[in-house]
């Protein structure tokens, strides 16, 4: 994965985390229980932190950074995605 692709994943994760956070705070608040809303917020938080980590990794040129990005992307999609699904 190139440096530009790593940056794109980081920006995409951070951007969608902000959008989903606003969606949860304003639209889902009336429809979800407080426990489900807290779980949703955890998914958003982890997605945002992983987006920041991907942005940091995009600045590195080491071979471990290139391999680590794949694990971050897949892990975030599985972890946050499953929390979003369970919450909604």
Image (spheres, grey):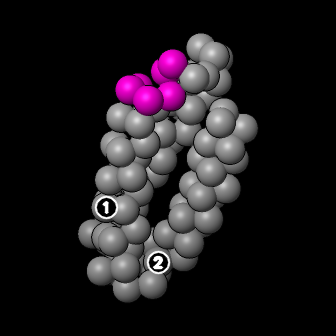
Query: Total of numbered circles in the picture?
Result: 2
* Residue 52 in view in this figure: no
Q: Which residues are magenta?
A: 25-30
Q: Label 1, on which residue?
A: 11
Q: Residue 81: x, y in percent?
A: 62, 51
Q: Residue 38: x, y in percent?
A: 57, 22
Q: Which sits earlier in the primary sequence, circle 1 or circle 2?
A: 1
Is 12 placed left or right of 68 in the picture? left
Label the magenta part by its dominant secondary structure. Answer: helix
Q: Residue 45: x, y in percent?
A: 46, 36
Quadrant hosting residue 21: top left
Q: Nearer the viewer, residue 45 or 23?
A: 23
Residue 26 counted in the magenta span:
yes
Q: Label 2, on which residue?
A: 66
Residue 55 counted in the magenta span:
no
Question: Residue 38 has which mark?
Answer: none
Q: Nearer the viewer, residue 55 or 43?
A: 43
Is 32 placed left or right of 49 in the picture? right
As drawn, 17 above or below 11:
above
Q: Nearer the viewer, residue 4 or 58?
A: 4
Mark 1 and mark 2 residues within 8 Å of each other at the beta carbon? no
Q: Nearer the viewer, residue 47 or 28?
A: 28
Q: Residue at x 31, y 61 (%)?
A: 11
As drawn, 35 above or below 22:
above
């Amino acid at each position: 994965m190139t440096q530009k692709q790593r940056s794109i994943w980081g920006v995409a994760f951070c951007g969608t985390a902000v959008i989903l956070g606003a969606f949860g705070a304003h639209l889902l608040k009336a429809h979800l229980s407080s426990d489900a809303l807290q779980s949703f917020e955890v998914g958003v938080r982890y997605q945002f932190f992983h987006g920041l980590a991907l942005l940091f990794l995009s600045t590195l040129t080491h071979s471990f950074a290139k391999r680590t990005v794949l694990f971050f992307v897949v892990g975030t999609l599985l972890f946050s995605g499953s929390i979003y699904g369970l919450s909604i």
